[in-house]
Image: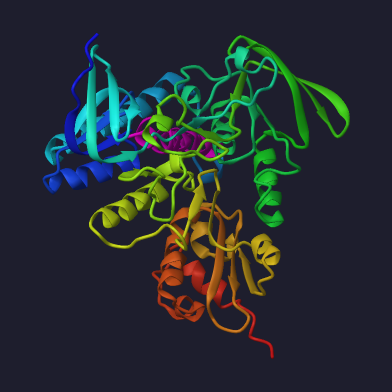
Amino acid sequence: MPTLQPEEYDLIVLGSGEAGKYIAWTEARKGMRTAVIERKYVGGSCPNIACLPSKNVVHSAKVASYFWRSAEFGITKENCQISMSAVRDRKRKMVDDLVEMHLGIFKASGAELIPGSGRFVGPKTIEIALSGGGTRVLRGDKVVISTGSRAKIDPIPGLAEAGPLTHVEALELDQIPGRLLVIGGGYIGLELAQAMRRFGSAVTIIDRNSRLLHREDHDVTDLLHGFLREEGIEILTNVRIGRAEGKSSEGVRIHATRDGSEITLEGTHILVATGRTPNTEGIGLELAGVETTERGFVRVNERLETTAPGVWAVGDCAGSPHFTHIAFDDFRVVRDNLAGKQRVTTGRQVPFCMFTDPEFARIGLSETEAREQGIAYRLAKIPMVSVLRTRTLSETRGFLKALIDTKSDRILGFTALGVEAGELIAVVQVAMLTGLPYTALRDVIFTHPTMPEGLTVLFSAVPAVTS
């Protein structure tokens, strides 16, 4: 077979995830001949199989929870039933609309979207096995690797053979699992465990650590344990899984040890939510001069440049914190550096929110991190019931807390565990980013009754500076 002559492009992006697509759209609009290679999910995992679809399903579960609580609101429910196929179809419609939106932006920007699987065959040169058949070879003056990550399945005997669900398959269920065994007590595991419980599944969460979200403060995890158990979710910590058997959806069994005792757990389905692994294998990085780390991430510097000249890596595959909003900031870093500016990833804020009910969100230092780093702080903490808006919603669970510097009025960190926590941290994040003292939030006039009004209550509780 004759060797294909490479087609020349100004910019090639491998993968159409958050950072990659925005880089392509931006540079294409500037007149650069740009190609984006995508093997399956137009727009990346976030609009197709991750962030947005999961929050869509989580919201359906929230609506279901209101039905179960209907008497509390003075509403009578009769013959309430959950249709998982309808839940799935609502999610699918949203995804279809998002894909159409992405296709429209690709067309308007001038960036060429090429469906297929790409792999490097030389420096800045990518061979594409086209989805419709055939092959193309592209060479770019600049190349961006944006291949993302996927759910990791640990090498536990029998686990892979059991065909466990990951978040991808869980979001496509058209029937409610009878008994769901969730392996992993992180964000994905907790969000989906609670959602499935609210749809009617019996749910057990299995975690190797001594508590869920084990890196967070104890007051956070203690309350989370309580909330989930109140909903009937079984939580098993300090579990070491030895092997699995059976077939997920037909019947599964997990053999494990807990605190030195052997246990056997039975269910209809297994959901694996134990972390992510980068999509960097088998794409010819070594032929492009692109090095990877011991964990398989593309090795990058603070400008997101790889070890190969003219090649960048962004998002999950580059080891950036696994959040879509961080991938978007990776786009801004590369965009500015392509324009000759000096922009780096170091020192940036990393806010996050877990969309359980209630939500958990944090920006800046936790108490655990502050103690580990030897940073002194003043602590302000209030229960969510002190925020009057929560009483109108019957959503009074949780708390707010803030860490304030001991010698100044600088905000070091903010934690929210409660309704609309993800919205609340944005207000504090802006204050932290601009260097506002906590007193600015204490003294501002917030609308009544809203959730931000609770920040006035919280920051009024900051202890005075002691000499």
Can you name the residue that lies furthest to the front here? 2
Image point 55% across, 64% down: which residue? 414
Toward which corner of the image does residue 251 lie, by quadrant? Answer: top right
What residue is rendered at 48% in x and 56% in y? Answer: 351
Left or right side of 406 for 285: left
Can residue 63 be found in the magenta stretch? yes
* Number of on-image labels: 0
Front one among 203 and 183 = 183
Q: Is residue 420 visible to the viewer in this orientation of the structure?
A: no
> x%, y% of residue 104?
17, 34
Choose between 309 and 76: the one closer to the eye: 309
Quadrant in the rendering for residue 182: top right
In the image, farthest residue toward the bottom: 467
Drawn side of residue 144 relative to residue 103, left or right: right
User: Is residue 371 one of those drawn in magenta?
Assistant: no
Q: Residue at x 47, y 63 (%)?
A: 347
Quick check: 245 above or below 214?
A: above
Look at the picture and state if 426 lies above or below 289: below
Vertical arrangement, residue 123 with respect to residue 251, above or below: below
Position of the C terminus by quadrant: bottom right
Q: Is residue 42 left or right of residue 305?
A: left
Position in image of residue 36 (x %, y %)? 25, 33
Q: Which quarter shows the N terminus?
A: top left
Give the x, y percent position of residue 5: 18, 22
Residue at image x 18%, y 38%?
Answer: 105
Q: Percent x, y for residue 258? A: 82, 31
Query: Does residue 121 appear in this view?
Result: yes
**Magenta stretch, residue numbers:** 43-70
Of residues 277 and 178, the one nearer the viewer is 277
Majority SS type along the magenta span? helix
Instruction: Name the residue at the right extreme.
Output: 260
